[in-house]
Every structure is written in C-alpha cells, then in structure tokens.
Image: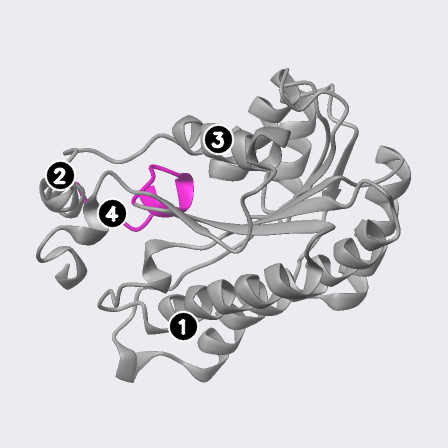
Amino acid sequence: MRLQGKRVIITGSSTGIGAAVAKRFLEEGAKVAVWGRNPDNAYTIARELPELANVVAVDVADAPAVDRAFAESLAALGGLDVLICNAGISIRRNFVDIDREEFDRVMKVNVHGVFYVSQLAARHMLQQDTGGAILMTASTSGVTAYRYYADYNASKGALIAMMRTMAIELAPKIRVNAVNPGYTMTPMQEGEYSPEMLARVNGIIPMKRHARPEEMASLYVYLASDEAAYASGAVFTLDGAESIASGAAYL
C-alpha cells in the first residue's frame, strides 16, 4: 500500500497503460480519477473498477473541457497529490504524406493537452504544504528517431523538454518525471500491427517481446510514491533495451 491516501488523476487511462496504472494504484491504496477521450471506454472502466473516485470522458486537447474535468475530479478526490499525463495518440505515416491537420492533432493531444492539465495541477499543488508529483508518459520516440513517426517523435521530444523545465521551476515542492515506455502491447499499439510486423518488432527487441501494461504500472507506482522523494527531472526508460539495440529505429 505504497500510495495509501494519495489522490491521483490519470489522463488517457480508460485503456492500455493508463488503465493498468489506474488498477495498480487502486491496489496500492490511492484514490483515483480516470480520464479518457472515448465515452464508451470510460463507461467500461467505470464498470470494471467501481472503486474509482471519478471517471470523466474528456479530450485533453480541448482546454475548456480540461478546466471542467479538472474541477470535477478535484472535487471528487478532495485534493490532488499525483498527476499522471498519459493521454497520447500517434499516426504512422511517411513524413511527406503527413497532413497538416494530423500533425496539429498529435501535437494538440500529446503536448498542449499535457500543458493544460499540468499547469492546473501545478498551481493547485504549489498551494498545499505537501506539494505533489507530476508524471508524464513520454516515449523512446522522444530520444530516438523512428521512421514514419515524425509527428509523434516531435511531440514526445517536446514533452521531455517541458518536463525538465517544470522540474527546475516547480522544485522543491513538486517532483516532475517522465517515463519512456518502449514497445508495449496496448490496444493503440496492437492496432498498428500486422502479424508480420509484430514478429519483426519482437525480433529487434533484446527481450524478444513487447512489454505488458502491468509492467509499466510498477514503475509509475515507484515514481508516485514517497520512495522516489529525490527523483525529479529524470527520464525513466523501460523498453527491454530496445532503444539501444542496433537497427531498432529503422523499422
């Protein structure tokens, strides 16, 4: 019960890594609010995890909607100790074929959305004696150039840069860190694969498999807990050594 009593908002948490984190945080004693863009997915996780304090269907790229969702979750939780910015999208496309609207959408969700909710959380946490922690789901894409993901790579690189600035400015009251998941078998990731591509990707990962969302959740638990009281401004990569393997970026 390392997170006993912690009040937590997790964006992008109705499926995939976020849903696994929400479930694990509940098991560790946290009080959790889940945000998801898809109302059907939000309804599903609310049914599967009835102990959640709050479930909101919200598009983090919509600033006024974020303001409303934050106020609702804050009231339901009675405060905020941990924010996890996990909402994100990707589009696999050759650089010259990316539509401007597609690029803008990826940046709005992956960068602007994180800014919107992080700023609200930081303002609240700075006013309380206990401070807080903000965690961002970045990606190995933020530090390694993967083909066909120029928009996603750019967004995650920006996220890491923003995290580092926040860590400096918000210390010592608020810790800010990023997690770089490698290939993880989430619904978003699985939807991009053919069987042949999945086998090819597994082949270049030294661990020879994708991560499970539950494995990612363990790292978030540590970073949100008091055990990580001196961790801030850091990027924690969990990718089975994929990002340092020769040829991984050329898939």
For the N terminus, give its image quadrant. top right
Looking at the picture, tell me which residue is in the foreground, 206 or 125: 125
Q: Magenta span covers which residues?
A: 183-195
Above or below, 201 relative to 213:
below
For the C terminus, give its image quadrant. bottom left
* Helix, strand or loop status at disc 4: loop
Judging by the rendered image, the residue that carries numbered circle 4 is: 193
Q: Give the alpha-carbon distance from disc 1 to disc 4, as whole Å.
A: 22 Å
Query: Majority secondary structure of the magenta segment?
Result: loop
Above or below, 163 relative to 215:
below
Depth check, mark 2 against mark 4: the one in front is: 2
Pick whichever of labels 2 and 3 is earlier in the sequence: 2
Judging by the rendered image, the residue that carries numbered circle 1 is: 154
Structure colour scheme: one colour
Q: Give the alpha-carbon distance from disc 4 to disc 3, as whole Å.
A: 23 Å
Q: Residue at x 13, y 50 (%)?
A: 245
Amino acid carrying label 1: it is: Ala
Give the number of the disc on residue 217: 3
Q: Residue at x 65, y 21 (%)?
A: 26
Judging by the rendered image, the residue that carries numbered circle 2 is: 206
